[in-house]
Amino acid sequence: MVSFHDEPLVLVDEHDREMGFLDKTSAHLGQGILHRAFSLFVFNSAGELLLQQRAQGKRLWPGYWSNTCCSHPRRGESMEKAVHRRLREELGQACELHFQFKFQYQAQFDDEGAEHELCWVYAGRCDEAPVVNVNEIAALRYVSPDALDEEIATHPEHFTPWFKIEWGRLRAEHAYLFQSHASLPS
């Protein structure tokens, strides 16, 4: 395991100012308590996005397809260190990651649990073969942006809510990500 139910999450206000800490389980109860998170989008040199299907053991959105990797920074950990740590832990990859934007959302999974996050979104390129952490990931696949647009349009229920929000914004505001080239501009 690379994450634990009792690990402290960083609670924030709507301006991303630290407000304290709360264990992961409690932060996701009910409608959730606003906390800091991140989402990573890793493309290969052909411009395809690496998608992950969340492990069945996940409390929220198990078995749903989502972005390459997502998690929370640890107490006292910089976001820069957190994104690289988690990419190694889940996929065994290392790549340059570029900050794109951050946003706040709340998504209810069931009566007992939700996400309520201020999420930092990063993108990068990597052609290293991923090494799956089976505690976190059920399956992986690469998909072209156009094919993913079509799949989300026809089967939105297969994807996590934060991923659909992030993908829509990346497609609308960050067109350079979808060009096949070796590196991304900062």
Image: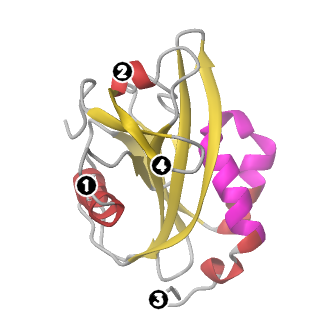
Q: Magenta residues?
A: 150-172
Q: CA distance from mark 4 to mark 2?
A: 21 Å
The amino acid type, in three-letter code, at marker 2 is Thr
Q: Does residue 43 appear in the picture of this structure?
A: no
The mark that comes first in sequence, 4 or 1, is: 4
Left of 178 or right of it: where is 38?
left
Label 2 secondary element: helix
The amino acid beneath tag 3 is Ser
Give the spatial CA distance, label 3 vs label 4.
Answer: 32 Å
User: Which tag is nearer the camera, tag 2 or tag 3?
Assistant: 2
Residue designated by label 1 = 77
Distance from Cα at disc 3 to Cα at disc 1? 26 Å
Point 58% across, 86% down: residue: 180
Confirm or deny contact between disc 3 and disc 1 (CB under 8 A): no
- Rendered image: mark on residue 183: 3
Which badge, 4 or 2, comes first in the chain's sequence?
Answer: 4
Looking at the image, is mark 3 or mark 4 nearer the viewer?
4
From the image, give the main secondary structure of the stretch colored magenta.
helix
- Which residue is labeled 2 in the image? 25
Q: Residue 18 in the image: x percent, y percent?
A: 41, 45
The crowding category of the residue bearing disc 4, from other C-alpha atoms within 10 Å (few below 14, some 14 to 19, many at least 20), is few
Whether 138 is among the magenta residues is: no
Residue 56: quadrant of the picture: top left
Q: Which residue is mark 4?
A: 17
- State the residue at coordinates (55%, 24%): 114
**Total numbered circles:** 4
Residue 147: which disc?
none
Q: Secondary structure at mark 4?
A: loop
Label 3 or label 1, whichever lies nearer to me, is: 1
Q: Determine the CA span between mark 2 and mark 3.
A: 37 Å
Q: Position of residue 5 (x, y in %)?
A: 28, 24
Q: Are marks 4 and 1 in contact (CB under 8 Å)?
A: no
